[in-house]
Amino acid sequence: MTFETGGKRPAMPGDPSQHAVTHRMIRVDQAGEYGARRIYAGQMAVLGHTRSGPTIRHMAAQEDAHLVAFDKLMVERRVRPTALTPLWHMAGFALGAATALMSERAAMACTTAIEETIDEHYARQRTTLGPDSPYEDGELLGVIETCHADELEHRDTAYQHGAAETPGYPVLSGLIKAGARTAIWLSERV
């Protein structure tokens, strides 16, 4: 959105500061990448030696790179991590292992549900950080865009590996998406 005078929307009274907005984004994104790493660790514990192992390992390696990028931003910008990291440590592994124990396709269904939720999340953040926003932040936007592209690749890969063919897929996907949205909301705030 541009204004008649051109340029970005001015900050309005009551708007959070750029510092508050970007710190919240870095905190939640670092928590999300940490959670994704734990989901893939759970899946690898069950499926690491199956035909899905190399695919999961590749996605996990990309998530590790994302986590490194957000960890670096946290240190550089002095962002506190979410207090819920211990919960995401256990819950992420449990979700990955549980869906992998159900089947390889269920593990892939977990991936599609998470990545579709993250697609929506990163798209909102990209809009918030864009050039017409009072919160413009090119560095953070660049990291988010790189991660977003990989997450879309993971979603597509999981669909190619039969995610949507999982028995009860709509229910499983809906439950995982609800959990992911809740984790995002909590990690932004706690």
Image: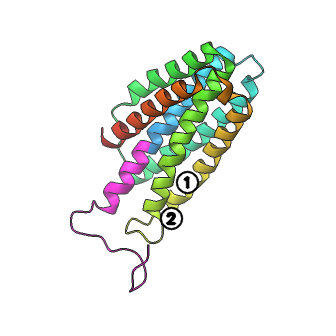
Tell me the chief SS of the magenta region. Answer: loop
Residue 143 is tagged as 1
Q: Disc 1 versus disc 2: distance between alpha carbons?
A: 9 Å
The amino acid sitting under disc 1 is Val
Q: Give the magenta part as a residue range.
A: 1-28
Q: Nearer the viewer, residue 133 or 140?
A: 133
Is 11 located above or below residue 91 in the figure?
A: below
Q: Nearer the viewer, residue 125 or 18?
A: 125
In the displayed image of the protein, which residue is found farthest to the right? 51
- Visible in this render: residue 183? yes
Q: Is residue 102 magenta?
A: no
**Quarter-of-image position of residue 134:** bottom left
Q: Is residue 49 left or right of residue 11?
A: right
Q: Name the quadrant of the N terminus.
A: bottom left
Q: Residue at x 60, y 37 (%)?
A: 64
The percent coordinates of residue 87 (x first, y second) are 39, 25
Q: Describe the element under mark 2 as helix, strand or loop.
A: helix
Q: Earlier in the sequence, mark 1 or mark 2?
A: 2
Q: Name the quadrant of the C terminus.
A: top left
The amino acid sitting under disc 2 is Gly
Which residue is disc 2 drawn over?
138
Q: Is residue 44 left or right of residue 3?
A: right
